[in-house]
Image (cartoon, helix red, strand yellow):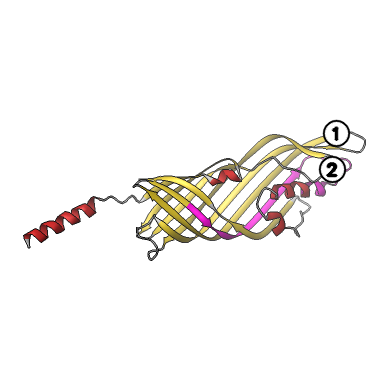
């Protein structure tokens, strides 16, 4: 009995000495595939044995290499370009599928996210007589997404993690706004704004197809709901 008690105490001591790290900080690597100068950081906290809260925020710039479907018009130098994002998801790590506690293994969960972008550029247009005119073009873009996600998180050793969101369908509110501070001879202003918004949508996968029937309003705004997707790979450190 004394020997059994001693062994049990040793076993319990070993279990207690294995520290569980409840916090992780991660860097999103895949956001730079779509956005420029993108730095998105993620904080994950273990709430329960198989549940975590994931919060993210960061800075992103919307790509400005736009191709306008507008005769004799082009976008020139940029004066301003900035943006930010934030959101959260609640993860349920599947106990039947995972050998270890959170935050390791297969997970499911709901998420919400918000992205905001602004830019100011010069739009130049040359009329039939060869006269060039230009004006400031201001754009503002907002995305709000609500959806669910499926993913897998690897833990390397004790401290390092690789987090992969493999599939994250959502319902997304898209709002594009474009304004010109000048009237261009020989070009319809609404036509120019529509061309700009179409060029912005071309930078996001499948978005033009999902919103093909939507037109720009007189104020230069196009807003609609459509299907969205979330996917990313991030690396991080536990503490």
Query: Which quadrant of the structure image shows residue 160?
Result: top left
Mark 2 surroundings: few (<14), some (14-19) or many (≥20) residues within 10 A: few
Percent from the top left, x then y, of residue 68? 77, 44
Left or right, 110 with reference to 132: left
Mark 1 surroundings: few (<14), some (14-19) or many (≥20) residues within 10 A: some
Left or right, 125 with reference to 21: right
Q: From the image, which quarter does the N terminus lie in? A: bottom left
Q: From the image, which quarter does the C terminus lie in? A: top left
Mark identifier at residue 143: none
81 or 208, which lies in front?
208
Q: What residue do we see at 75% from left, 46% from top?
A: 196
Which residues are drawn in magenta?
164-193
Percent from the top left, x then y, of residue 133? 84, 35
Percent from the top left, x then y, of residue 128? 91, 38
Spatial separation of the CA atoms under disc 1 and disc 2: 13 Å
Q: Are marks 1 and 2 in contact (CB under 8 Å)?
A: no
* Numbered disc total: 2
Q: Which residue position holds label 1?
A: 132
Percent from the top left, x then y, of residue 151? 48, 57
140 or 91, which lies in front?
91
Q: Which residue position holds label 2?
A: 71
Q: Is residue 186 magenta?
A: yes
194 or 138, which lies in front?
194
Q: What residue do we see at 33% from left, 49% from top?
A: 21
């Amino acid at each position: 009995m004394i020997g059994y008690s001693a062994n049990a105490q040793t076993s319990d001591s070993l279990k207690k000495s294995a520290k569980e790290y409840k916090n992780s900080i991660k860097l999103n690597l895949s956001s730079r595939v779509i956005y420029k100068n993108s730095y998105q950081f993620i904080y994950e906290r273990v709430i329960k044995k198989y549940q975590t809260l994931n919060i993210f925020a960061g800075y992103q710039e919307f790509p400005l290499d736009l191709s306008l479907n507008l005769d004799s018009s082009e976008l020139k130098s940029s004066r301003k370009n900035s943006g930010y994002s934030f959101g959260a998801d609640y993860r349920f790590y599947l106990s039947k599928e995972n050998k270890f506690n959170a935050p390791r293994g297969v997970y499911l969960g709901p998420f919400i996210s918000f992205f905001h972008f602004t830019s100011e550029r010069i739009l130049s247009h040359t009329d039939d007589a060869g006269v060039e005119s230009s004006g400031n073009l201001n754009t503002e873009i907002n995305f709000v997404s609500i959806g669910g996600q499926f993913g897998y998180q690897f833990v390397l050793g004790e401290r390092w993690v690789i987090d992969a969101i493999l599939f994250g369908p959502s319902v997304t509110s898209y709002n594009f706004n474009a304004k010109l501070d000048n009237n261009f001879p020989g070009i319809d202003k609404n036509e120019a704004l529509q061309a700009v918004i179409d060029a912005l949508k071309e930078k996001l996968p499948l978005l033009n197809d999902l919103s093909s029937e939507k037109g720009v309003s007189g104020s230069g705004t196009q807003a609609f709901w459509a299907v969205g997707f979330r996917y990313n790979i991030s690396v991080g450190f536990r503490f």
